[in-house]
């Protein structure tokens, strides 16, 4: 009756059986050895999972093969912003026409629906970046935190900071040529590198708060000084509502990137972080991620 129940459940079941006076066959109280955990099969072309506590590898599939990353790039965008010295999250940024034009020029790329002329705080821009995956929010942040006398120079400077950060983190197979994942031929990373990046980003409390938020409604200041209540931003990470313990992190997609997901979950005090790149659909990247999370937790015991 208790055969196959693992670990504590086995011991508990055995104890209950004894105390209730049930007749147990000889040896039934011996805890069965941990079952070998079957390595899952995923549709994604690349995958990687690690134990956040010690960065130990738990799963690999083409983990060091460079691929297009789509909007998982925005993890680095957020990390660079949050690493700025003397960062004021309540500083206001005025939304420029260039940001909305950029969305239109890129076939209405994923956006936060920011309104030209509105004043939006850096904190709100980070939510707009990470929840609805706003490329307009990414542009605004790159323009704000890059250095230079022109917008083009500031954007170039910000992307430079992204690459410097990647180098400092030891991400040898990562390069960015965009602030949002809409690449120009040289925007790539790997499942291992993106997982390491996520692990580093999650050390920041503001980042942790944002990426585990399911929805957020920003109140911005209009040109006339009135308050605008923005349409609620919903997090594109479906794991937040479907996998217990999920704490983030970021989705990505695109013609080249296919469907990507950098994910993290905490159960029983243990945190597993991973990445799947080039899966076949939104639903499949989530299925892949759940398989890898289950496997990661099973490996950790």
Image (tube, helix red, strand yellow):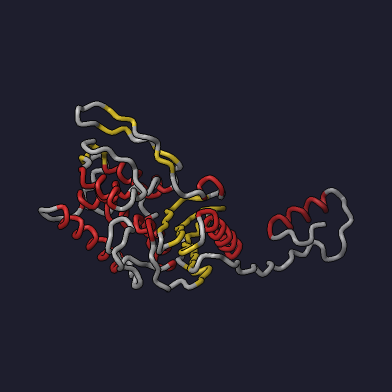
Residue placed most toward the observer, 102 or 23: 102
| In the image, residue 214 above or below residue 282 | above
Residue found at x 31% / y 32%:
219
- In percent of width and height, residue 44 lies at 51, 65
| In the image, residue 298 above or below residue 151 | below
Residue found at x 29% / y 67%:
168
Residue found at x 87% / y 62%:
25
Q: State which quarter of the image contains the N terminus.
A: bottom right
- In percent of width and height, residue 38 lies at 64, 68
- In percent of width and height, residue 76 lies at 32, 58
- Relative to 181, 25 lies left or right: right
Q: State which quarter of the image contains the C terminus.
A: bottom right
Residue found at x 45% / y 59%:
260
- Relative to 246, 250 lies left or right: left
The quarter of the picture where residue 37 lies is bottom right
Residue placed most toward the observer, 79 or 41: 41
**Which residue is the extreme one toward the right?**
23
The quarter of the picture where residue 164 lies is bottom left
- In percent of width and height, residue 120 lies at 26, 38
């Amino acid at each position: 009756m208790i055969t196959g129940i693992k670990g504590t459940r086995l011991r508990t079941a055995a104890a209950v059986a004894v105390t209730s006076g049930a007749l147990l066959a000889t040896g039934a109280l011996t805890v069965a050895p941990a079952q070998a955990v079957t390595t899952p099969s995923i549709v994604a072309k690349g995958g990687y999972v690690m134990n956040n506590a010690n960065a130990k590898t738990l799963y690999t599939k083409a983990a060091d093969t460079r691929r297009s990353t789509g909007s998982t790039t925005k993890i680095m965008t957020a990390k660079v912003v949050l690493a700025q010295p003397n960062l004021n999250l309540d500083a206001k940024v005025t939304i420029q026409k260039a940001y909305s034009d950029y969305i239109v020029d890129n076939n209405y790329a994923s956006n936060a629906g920011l309104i030209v002329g509105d004043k939006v705080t850096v904190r709100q821009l980070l939510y707009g970046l990470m929840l609805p995956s706003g490329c307009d929010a990414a542009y605004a942040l790159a323009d704000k935190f890059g250095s230079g006398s022109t917008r083009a120079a500031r954007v170039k400077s910000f992307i430079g900071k992204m690459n410097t950060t990647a180098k400092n983190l030891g991400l040898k197979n990562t390069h960015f040529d965009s602030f949002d994942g809409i690449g120009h031929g040289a925007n790539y990373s790997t499942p291992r590198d993106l997982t390491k990046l996520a692990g580093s980003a999650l050390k920041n409390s503001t980042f942790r708060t944002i990426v585990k938020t399911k929805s957020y409604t920003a109140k911005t200041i209009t040109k006339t000084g009135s308050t605008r209540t923005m349409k609620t931003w919903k997090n594109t990470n479906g794991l937040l509502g479907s996998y217990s313990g999920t704490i983030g992190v970021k989705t990505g997609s695109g013609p080249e990137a296919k469907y990507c997901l950098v994910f993290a979950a905490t159960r029983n005090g243990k945190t597993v972080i991973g990445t799947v790149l080039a899966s076949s659909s939104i639903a499949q990247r989530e299925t892949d991620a759940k398989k890898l999370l289950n496997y990661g937790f099973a490996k950790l015991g």
